Each structure stands twice: as structure tokens, then as C-alpha cells.
Image: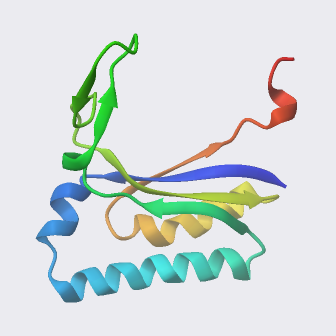
Amino acid sequence: MTEYVVLILGDADRWWSSMSLKEREDGYAEYDRFGAELTRRGHKIVGGAELHPTTEARTVQPGGQSITDGPFVETAEQVGGFYQVETSDPDDLMECCKIIAGLGDAVEVRRCVSPEERPS
């Protein structure tokens, strides 16, 4: 099986904070459904987390000489969370990702570099 990272991209700082409690509960239920569907279809979740808002982020700037508060790049889209998934069917993984994309955020799926692919 190959490992992928599923990145949830959007304006989580604004989006989640503007939702009612019921809307948030419904959103979390969709994430639970996503996880259950991955398992049902034979994908394996090996890691992941919801992230705190970018207002709590700190960034080591290129060159490593300074640390700043907040994200390095100013953009409307930030990573709000991620899953690490092992699968032998990336096309089906993409189909499953439509569940959480239905909530309004983009979902980016990227294959992880395996140890065998690294130069020795």
C-alpha cells in the first residue's frame, strides 16, 4: 500500500468560527462518516489531526534566522487539518474525499515519498 496525505484546505479560521453549534456538529459528523467510509472501503488511516487556527501558528522563516507569529504566506486558503492514509486504490480515496469537500473546503491529496524513493 502507498501512503498519502489528505490536506483539508480552506479558510478554517473564519469558516468554522462563523458556524452555529449545530452546523459544527453536522460538519464533525461528516468527518466521522469520511473516516468510517475509508475503513469500510479498505483504506487505512495511519495519522492525522484537526489543526488550531493560524492565529496560533509560528513560522521559521527561510534561512532559519527568524521566527514570526502566524503563517508565512498570506493566502485565503490554509491547512485546517490532515489525514495520513495508506491505500492501494488512490482513485477510490479521491471518491471518499468528496464527502469532506462537500462541506465547502478543498481537499488536496498527495502521495508521500517512501524511504525507498529517497536518494541513498
Q: Is residue 110 above or below residue 80?
A: above
In the image: residue 87, left or right of residue 100? right
Q: Residue at x 22, y 37 (%)?
A: 70
In the image: residue 33, left or right of residue 16? right
Q: How many marks?
A: 0
Using the image as rendered, state which of residue 59 and residue 50 is in the foreground: 59
Q: Residue at x 83, y 28 (%)?
A: 117
* Percent position of residue 105, x then y: 34, 59
Q: Is residue 3 above or below residue 17?
A: above
In the image: residue 42, left or right of residue 96? right
Q: Is residue 64 above or below residue 3?
A: above
Q: Is residue 77 above or below residue 115?
A: below
In which quadrant of the rendered image does the C terminus lie? top right
Using the image as rendered, state which of residue 53 and residue 41 is in the foreground: 53
Q: Residue at x 61, y 82 (%)?
A: 36
In which quadrant of the rendered image does the N terminus lie? bottom right
Q: Quadrant of residue 52?
A: bottom left
